[in-house]
């Protein structure tokens, strides 16, 4: 990585160490020091910083609690300015089909940004962060799930498992990007190594992976097939509603709206979403520990990045790049996350990645337990040499 991600810095503050005026009575007054000496002492006192202990992850949880309550009016507004443009672009794209397939396709591609934003509103609903009333948030999430191709209640359960085990080496494989340690990779068979290398290749992770996940895997309650009828009802209900929508599109204009509008918008949104999820946890100085040493708050704070995107990208991604704060306190609505950073400079700088730095994260593949960082396959070969 060209510029390594930054850990949470020590909180420091500058203070002036001033001496109180004293009146010496009943005794001989001391000889005053020369003016130049006094100025030197005062200047030295003014610039000497008083270093405070950095907040622990547990202490940050208490700080962040004040931001947790959603604003119903703001949430309704955020929902409206996401759903209405989404519907508007769909209407324009359907109208464009009558004279230009190319324009319809371009509008479908543009709508991917709103599909992504709707998914992230669904994400906040799943955390109970968007509306204080749980039922309201859940039903909004279920409706949005029809258009994001993600069964709401299944995703809510599996995503909760991701939050409860992120960074835990002994609880990998559920809601994360599969990551092997250097020792595991070296102990693997040649076939296992080949399969892992294919899995971690960008073409698979960000090309084939999103299509498999959203078009196929999400059609069943993956990971919860034996957890009861509720999750089957979530998956099958979402499938039925999505199918009804697609049948209506086909009845209106055949395969064109499905192939030129629906699929491009969903697949591009899924690809961007996969990239975001990868960057949020797969950076060089992330956090992994065995179960005996793993701490949920430390994993949340230090194992999640601050992906500092341009303003427009932050808007469409609903501030999900402020991921370290989100993992530390998932009940904070996404529209309050920027205020958290404005109020707490330490968090604004912690694990900060710009877009250019994030591109280099695709070369990290293995967790080096000795160096406590992610390394590339090439670096692993160098270590063996």
Image (cartoon, rainbow, N blue to C red):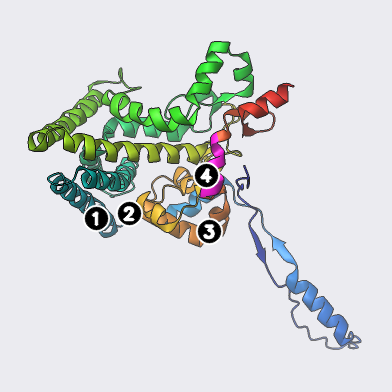
Give the spatial CA distance, label 3 vs label 1: 27 Å
Asked if marks 4 and 3 touch (Cβ < 8 Å), the reply is: no
Give the spatial CA distance, label 4 vs label 1: 28 Å
Asked if marks 3 and 1 touch (Cβ < 8 Å), the reply is: no
Q: How crowded is mark 3: few (under 14 residues within 10 Å), some or many (20 or more)?
A: some
Give the spatial CA distance, label 4 vs label 3: 16 Å
- Secondary structure of residue under mark 2: loop
For residue 236, say whether it is visible. yes
Residue range in magenta is 355-362
User: Horizontally, is 284 left or right of 281 in the view?
Assistant: right
User: Horizontally, is 331 left or right of 18 in the view?
Assistant: left
| Residue occupied by mark 1 | 76
Tell me the mark number nearer the camera, choosing from 2 and 1: 1
Which one is in front, 180 or 55? 180
Q: Which residue is drawn at 44% across and 35% down?
A: 163
Residue 269: image location, x then y, percent: 33, 40
Q: Which mark is residue 344?
A: 3
Which one is in front, 366 or 201? 201
Residue 222: image location, x then y, percent: 33, 23
Residue 75: image location, x then y, percent: 28, 55
| Residue occupied by mark 4 | 305
| Residue occupied by mark 2 | 70
């Amino acid at each position: 990585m060209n510029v390594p991600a930054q850990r949470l810095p020590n909180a420091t503050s500058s203070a002036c160490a001033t001496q109180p005026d004293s009146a010496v009575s009943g005794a001989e007054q001391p000889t005053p020091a020369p003016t130049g000496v006094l100025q030197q002492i005062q200047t030295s006192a003014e610039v000497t910083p008083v270093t405070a202990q950095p907040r622990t992850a547990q202490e940050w949880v208490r700080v962040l609690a004040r931001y947790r309550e959603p604003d119903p009016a703001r949430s309704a507004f955020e929902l409206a300015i996401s759903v209405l443009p989404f519907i508007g672009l769909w209407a324009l794209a359907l109208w464009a089909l009558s004279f230009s397939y190319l324009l319809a396709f371009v509008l479908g591609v543009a709508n991917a940004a709103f599909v992504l934003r709707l998914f992230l509103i669904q994400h906040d609903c799943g955390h109970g962060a968007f509306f204080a009333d749980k039922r309201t948030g859940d039903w909004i999430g279920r409706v949005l799930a029809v258009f994001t191709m993600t069964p709401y209640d299944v995703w809510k359960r599996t995503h909760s498992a991701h939050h409860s085990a992120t960074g835990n080496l002994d609880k990998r494989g559920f809601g994360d990007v599969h990551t092997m340690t250097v020792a595991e990779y070296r102990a693997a068979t040649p076939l296992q190594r080949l399969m892992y290398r294919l899995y971690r290749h960008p073409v698979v992770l960000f090309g084939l992976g999103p299509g498999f996940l959203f078009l196929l895997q999400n059609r069943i309650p993956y990971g919860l097939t034996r957890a009861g009828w509720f999750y089957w009802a979530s998956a099958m209900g979402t499938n039925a509603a999505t199918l009804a929508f697609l049948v209506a599109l086909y009845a209106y204009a055949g395969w064109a709206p499905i192939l030129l509008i629906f699929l491009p918008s969903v697949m591009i949104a899924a690809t961007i979403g996969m990239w975001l999820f990868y960057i949020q946890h797969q950076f060089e100085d992330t956090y992994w520990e065995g179960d005996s040493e793993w701490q949920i708050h430390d994993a949340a704070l230090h194992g999640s990045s601050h992906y500092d995107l341009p303003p427009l990208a932050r808007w469409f991604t609903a501030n999900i790049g402020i991921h370290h704060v989100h993992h530390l306190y998932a009940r904070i609505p996404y529209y309050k996350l920027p205020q958290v950073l404005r109020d707490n400079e330490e968090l604004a700088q912690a694990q900060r990645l710009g877009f250019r730095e994030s591109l280099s994260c695709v070369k990290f593949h293995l967790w080096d337990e000795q160096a406590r960082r992610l390394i590339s396959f090439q670096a692993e070969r160098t270590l063996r040499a």
